[in-house]
Amino acid sequence: MTEAIRVEGLTKRFGELVAVDDVSFEIDQGEVFGLLGPNGAGKTTTISMLATLLRPTSGSATVDGRDIERDQDGVRHSIGIVFQDQSLDEELTAAENMDLHGRLYRIPSETRRTRTAELLDLVGLSERKDDVVKTFSGGMRRRLEIARGLLHHPAVLFLDEPTLGLDPQTRNLLWEYIANLAREKGITIILTTHYMEEADRLCNRVAIIDHGRIIALDTPERLKDRVGGDVVIVRSSSPELIAPALDEPWIGRVEIHGGEATISVQQAEKHLSAIVTRLVERQVPVESIAIRKPTLEDVFLYFTGKAIREEEASGTDQMRMFMRARRR
């Protein structure tokens, strides 16, 4: 496979704060690579360095074979970016937003028109190309932003929470677009998301970042295998009593989150009655109990000890930074 991105020892400090701490990874061409992490973990800072929005404190990286410090213009021409917050001009039409973006990249007018028509057709907006963006739904705006990010034929596309706030039907539609871009167009995609289902469905590999460091990196299936066994969820008014009550060799980890315990168990169906018996004997109040296979949410909780939350960084501010960089 052709290598699209190489990151070696990438570090970013803001005074005493180490936002990204000696991060290294490689991404192949056409791969969908997920970055998962809680607030402040370093995901957005990592993407900002790869997109030349921030200079690293140390370390190095190449994007499409171009060094992020020595060839910033080359990197910017090789990438497309769709930030978490909307950055479209609502008073312009879909076609006008595309045309403006093409002019920033100095794409010839005939090529702009041809590519705009192709991409609006790709995302299902051909019939709305002359409508102003303020009349568009949230899903239509996200599709337009993806089309705009592809206008200059980027080799790498950064998607920061691409389906945040969308309804399930629109989210599934966008997942199809994203998967097709990688599979049929060979575009490398780096995706940040707090939707575990999204990462599980789209990503070839996932990196979990916490406190600026990558603490796990593998395919979703292998990461779930590392959690092991089945997952038993016990909801209780006294969840802190559950772990002491389940002192058995076939019980794995017991983690408390809110009012429930997440228990790793091999062959959970076989041991379910024994779990209930132990809890009753120890007078642990049980409100409900359920069994399921491990998910990426379980993986995330296992490695970080926290629930994933939405990033706080403003995508609108980042887009302004990117546009300013483009005009330099």
Image: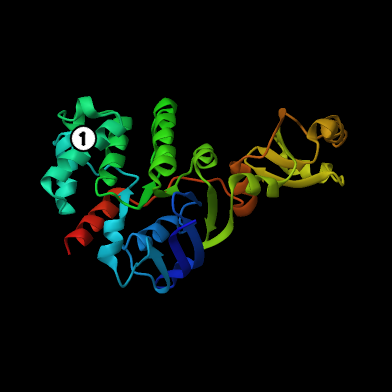
Q: Is residue 191 above or below residue 19?
A: above
Q: Is residue 77 above or below residue 69?
A: above
Whether residue 315 sits left or right of residue 198 in the image: it is left
Residue farthest along the front direction in this orientation: 1
Return the x and y of residue 197 as percentages of the image width and height. 53, 37
- Whether residue 129 is visible here, answered yes or no, is yes
> Residue type at mark 1?
Ala
- Whether residue 212 is visible here, answered yes or no, is no
Whether residue 123 sits left or right of residue 275 in the image: it is left
Return the x and y of residue 282 as percentages of the image width and height. 85, 37
Q: How is the image coloured?
A: rainbow
Instruction: Look at 75% across and 41% down and name the residue there.
Output: 229
Foreground: 256 or 133? 133
Picture quadrant of residue 54:
bottom left
Residue farthest along the left direction in this orientation: 109
Give the SS element for disc 1.
helix
User: Which residue is identified by label 1?
Assistant: 117
Return the x and y of residue 306 as percentages of the image width and height. 58, 49
Instruction: Look at 24% across and 49% down and name the residue there.
Output: 152
